[in-house]
Structure formats: C-alpha cells, structure tokens
Amino acid sequence: MLVKNNYNSILYFLKYMWFDILIIIIYAIIVGTIDHNTFLKKISIPLPITAITGTIVSLLLAFRTAQSYDRWWEARKIWGEIVNDSRTLIRQIKQFLPNTDSDKELIDFAERQIIWCYALSDSLRKKQFSTIVSLYLEKNKIKANNIPAKLLNVHCEQLASLATKFNLNDNKQVQIDTTISRLNDAMGKCERIKNTVFPKSYSLLIHFLIYVLASILPFGLDDNYPVLEIFLTIIIPLLLIAVEQTAIIMQDPFENQPTDIPMTTLCEVIENNISEIISNKAIEPPKNTNTYYLK
C-alpha cells in the first residue's frame, strides 16, 4: 500500500501510462500543427459532440473507479477482520483453558495462527511460501493444495482434542469454533476477490472511447490558439487515462504490488499482538523502513 507521495510513487504510476502518453503527445502535435496549414483546417466538429463524448467517458470512469475501490476497500476490511479474529482466537484459548498443563497447547495455537496469516498472504499473492511458513510446514509435515484451509482444519482437530482433554464445556468450545469459522469465511472472501477477474471488455470500451475523444478533440477546439489546442488535446485525454489507470491498479488488491493491501505488514502486527497475549509482555513492533509503501 502506497504511504507517501514521492517521486517513486509517481514513477510507479507513470510506468503504466508511458505508451499512452507518447501516442497522445505525438498525435496532438502532428494534428495540431497540420490543422492550421492544410485541408484539415476545414474539418470542424461541433463542440457539443465532443462534450457528449467526454461526458459518456466520465460517467463510465466514475462507475469503473467506484467498483475498483469497492474491491480494494472490501479486501482491506476483510484483513481488518482477520487481525481482530486472530487476536480473539488466542485470547479465547488462553482464557478458556486451565492455567496448568495448557501452555504447550496455547503456544501451538498461537504459532499456527501466525503461520496461517503468512500462508494466506503468500497464497493470495501466488508466490512461494516465505521461509517461516516453509519451515513450519516441513517441521509439522503438513501437505495440502490449500495450506491455509489445512491449518484451520488442524485448529479444529486440536480444539476437539482439548475439549476432551480439559473437559471444555460446550459453550466455550462453540465460541472458539465460531472464531475459527469467521477466519475461514474471511479466507473465502479473499479467494473470491482474487479469483474474480474484472471484465476486460469493460476496460477496453473505456480505453477506446478515450482515444475517440482524443481523436476528435482537436477538431472541436478554437483554431486561433494552436499552442493551447495542442495542450488541451494532450492534457484532457491523459487525465482521463490517469483516472482509468488508477481504477485498474486498485481492482486487484492481492497482486504483490506496491498498491496492494499491506498483508505482510498486517501479518507482522498479528504476530506481535499474539506474542504479547501469550507472554504477557510488551513487545516492540517491527519498524517499517520503507517510506515508499507497506508490503
């Protein structure tokens, strides 16, 4: 997640637009120049037609941006729920189990929940598991196509074992199981966002209409000010493309990009909070050394 407006953020944004910038600048200069010296000067498109086209593009972009932000914000809210439920789960295990003979079980749950968060983050980003996850899976001989789901199943298996071992009453067992179910629901919501592709045809339509607007714009402006005409032919389409690109960047929040949900940072927060719960000691959280974005 980008956290600061510096040159890195601007360069990251512009690298997706450089081709459009180049094409529009070349077109605006060529058409703006010959429009005052050749037969093109006779071509005149009424400004209302250009205005109608611009209005249509603006409405489509507004809807597109809103939908993309909704996806990004939903993903962020889901990870906020994961943070809360992770802390709740360990707090419940610590409070509901007897103070004696349960330290190992508490540590097992805490370690597994931390690994679950990191594993879910890596799975959503479609990248290899981090070292901490790989070592845990190898140590505990855990293998599955869906590792986060498997870890939650192990949670439930251990909960059933603890209910028998410590004679845990049904109410407490149900509360813990409900928390695990909420974690499972959050995982499913993340997978839904990850696996639902935003319709490509919709993006192509908007991009096409922006280029249509850029094409007819020089013929609808006043020919008495060529420099201003060229400037407007460049700046108006590029502003629309910038809005479109913003929507495209936001629509996929789990792509291991600077604009993603900061899942790694949230996992570190969860790890810190859980460590404090089981140790009853204040633990200094890791400091973010990257002023560009949160991972």
Image (spheres, helix red, strand yellow):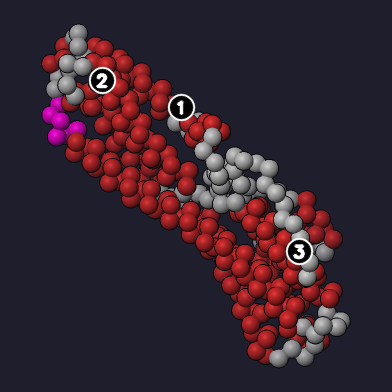
Q: Is residue 57 above or below residue 196?
A: above
Q: Residues within 10 Å of mark 2 (few under 14, many from 20)?
A: some
Residue to which mark 3 is pinned:
282
| Distance from Cα at disc 1 to Cα at disc 3 | 48 Å
Residue to which mark 1 is pinned:
18
- The mark tally for this picture is 3
Q: Position of residue 96 (x, y in %)?
A: 73, 83
Residue to which mark 2 is pinned:
228
Asked whether disc 1 touches disc 2, contact meaning CB atoms under 8 Å apart, the reply is no
Q: Position of residue 200 (x, y in %)?
A: 41, 45
Give the magenta-colored segment's residue range: 45-50
Under circle 3, the secondary element is loop
Q: Residues within 10 Å of mark 1 (few under 14, many from 20)?
A: few
Under circle 1, the secondary element is helix
Q: Position of residue 217 (x, y in %)?
A: 23, 27
Classify residue 48 by image quadrant: top left
Q: Can residue 31 be seen in the rendering of this structure?
A: no
Under circle 2, the secondary element is helix
Which mark lies nearer to you, 1 or 2? Answer: 2
Q: Amino acid at mark 3?
A: Ala
